[in-house]
Amino acid sequence: MPEFRQNMVSKEWVIIATERAKRPDNFIQEKKVKNSLPSHRADCPFCPGNESMTPPSLFSIEKNGVWSLRVVPNKFAALQSHLTTQRNREGRFLKADGFGIAEVIIETPVHNHTIATMGLEEVRNTVLTYRERYAALSKNERLELITIFRNYGEKAGTSLEHPHSQIIATPIVPPHVRTPLYQSQLACDTFGDCIYCGMMEEERRQGVRVVKETEYFLVISPFASRSPFETRIYPKIHRSSYATISDPELNDFAAVLQETLKRLSIGLNDPDYNYVIRSAPIEDTNVKYHHWYVVIVPKLTTPAGFEIGTGIYINTTLPEHCAEFLRRVQIQ
Amino acid sequence: MPEFRQNMVSKEWVIIATERAKRPDNFIQEKKVKNSLPSHRADCPFCPGNESMTPPSLFSIEKNGVWSLRVVPNKFAALQSHLTTQRNREGRFLKADGFGIAEVIIETPVHNHTIATMGLEEVRNTVLTYRERYAALSKNERLELITIFRNYGEKAGTSLEHPHSQIIATPIVPPHVRTPLYQSQLACDTFGDCIYCGMMEEERRQGVRVVKETEYFLVISPFASRSPFETRIYPKIHRSSYATISDPELNDFAAVLQETLKRLSIGLNDPDYNYVIRSAPIEDTNVKYHHWYVVIVPKLTTPAGFEIGTGIYINTTLPEHCAEFLRRVQIQ
């Protein structure tokens, strides 16, 4: 029997379409070219030796003059740092100069690594760098929101093979971000606590959608997953922003992020994916009602007209089955 | 210079990334298999002679016992008509039985037609049928929202080649639909008129994004287009629901819908697309603050992590250029 399920924060619904149900192993990808990439490419702007193909580093992790991670301004940035935050009217329409900051985190010198296969030290450097850059950008008073994300593979919207994450900081908090904040604020005004903390308590109690629990993190296939193998990582300590992640949490986060991506990569044969770290806006860095988290969306299905029209996603796979599948993946 | 532009109804922003700008003709698709489809396939459930492969017709247009259009229940429906609208709690989570109605409109007996290439009579039958089925479904008091849409091509989420549209009627109005309704209601409470009517007035005044204007319809590349060649068709007479479209408007709508899809198909070499008719919820069929419209989204780009995280779409093409490109397409 199909059912509607509601995301308890955003209040959006999904349809879990059991009549069309697919087993999790239907989503195992065919073998891809990615598996046979070289470790270095002479024409890759992110490979060592080609540093002049990118703008100079904003931040780097080096040892004996050799870098293991670099952060550079995005050469093809959608937003630019030298503009104003001026809003302008064009008749009845509102626009604003395209001010913002876009950075690229080159996670490793090795062209054919991925978060799932690189050394844990490299993942640690990456997530540490997220915190460093978040801190640096949040000092800019013209910025309101910092979004950290990773596009992996062509279906996820990237053509650059070399392992990298991105940060885009905007002077605007869009409704897509603000609306769920209103909802979680209202829930907090009503019940006095964080709706995400309550959700985690419920997920732990029910257990069936838990992929992994560590000292500091909970990994789940969410109750109202919009697509097969949507996976979320929540910090167990209430924090509204990635800005305030502690060192012990950071170490655990590196391990849990890598392990989760390994489970997806090994279980589904290296699917393309996006992940996003959702923090509260900069000025709400310490609030009771928001709780930062990572959402990982493997690109396994295509949203169509119904999803565009209603925002109700039709998901053909039970999150409970996805969690079970991911728990069983042999990662060693 | 890149700029933010705001959708004046939903208040969502897009980034028009002129630094990455692509000319409209960058989006012309490569030649596809679709062009060489047969006019009949023995294994197609929607081709004449295979009527037993679908459930019986709910509605049809026939002449001398031969059908030219059929509406059938969706055999692989995500929702089912025999269930209840019961909400159920599962701990802190909310779910509901998957009640709803899903129908398929088989628009023509001819396997290899498309809206862009079929006879105008067939398009007229299709849009007339939209109204018929809308009227029939809106009598069901357990339904709240009727979404009419068309998925064309694999990138748009369909594997069925035979020309068809779909209707899904749900017992739920999701936040994705409700939130812009709040916005347009607030605008109406403030200014006393329909925000869509005002937007159309502004688009006509500026002119640069108008693709076509007919007696009853305005076709535009919206000011805050989320992706290249997003195209919208608005009725010039204020109506909040497709349910109330008049006969003269219906005739004009058939012609304008076909012409718009022809412009996209000829100009961009038959791209995959979704279109959706956005009407107000059934109980708001006659309200001042909503205005029905069609949004056509050709599948030319891939939303990535930033879009998932913020809802801010990065559009690399100016809507003004898309409108100009579409106006210039030779459709005869």
Image (cartoon, coloured by chain):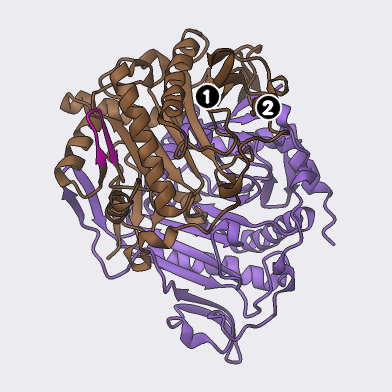
Chain colours: A brown, B purple
Quick one: quadrant of the C terminus of chain B?
A: bottom right
Mark 1: secondary structure: strand
Q: Residue at x 82, y 52 (%)?
A: B329
N-terminal of the pair, mark 1 or mark 2, is 2
Label the magenta part by its dominant secondary structure.
strand
Q: Position of residue B65 (x, y in %)?
A: 57, 91
Location of residue B40 with respect to B254 vertically, above or below: below
Question: What chain does mark 2 sit on?
Answer: A
Which numbered circle lies on residue A167? Answer: 1
Camera-side residue of B54 and B260? B54
Q: Residue at x 67, y 50 (%)?
A: B217
Location of residue B165 with respect to B228 vertically, above or below: below
Q: Amino acid at mark 1?
A: Ile
Q: Position of residue A101 (x, y in %)?
A: 58, 18
Quick one: quadrant of the N terminus of chain B?
A: top right
Q: Extreme bottom residue here?
A: B64
Q: Which residue is mark 2?
A: A76
Camera-side residue of B203 and A23? A23
What is the crowding at mark 1: few (fewer than 14 residues within 10 Å), some, or many (at least 20)?
A: many
Q: Are marks 1 and 2 in contact (CB under 8 Å)?
A: no
Q: Position of residue A132 (x, y in %)?
A: 45, 14
Q: Position of residue B133 (x, y in %)?
A: 47, 68
Q: Amino acid at mark 2?
A: Phe
Was residue A214 drawn as part of the magenta stretch in this picture? yes
Segment colored magenta:
A212-219
Which numbered circle lies on residue B192? Answer: none
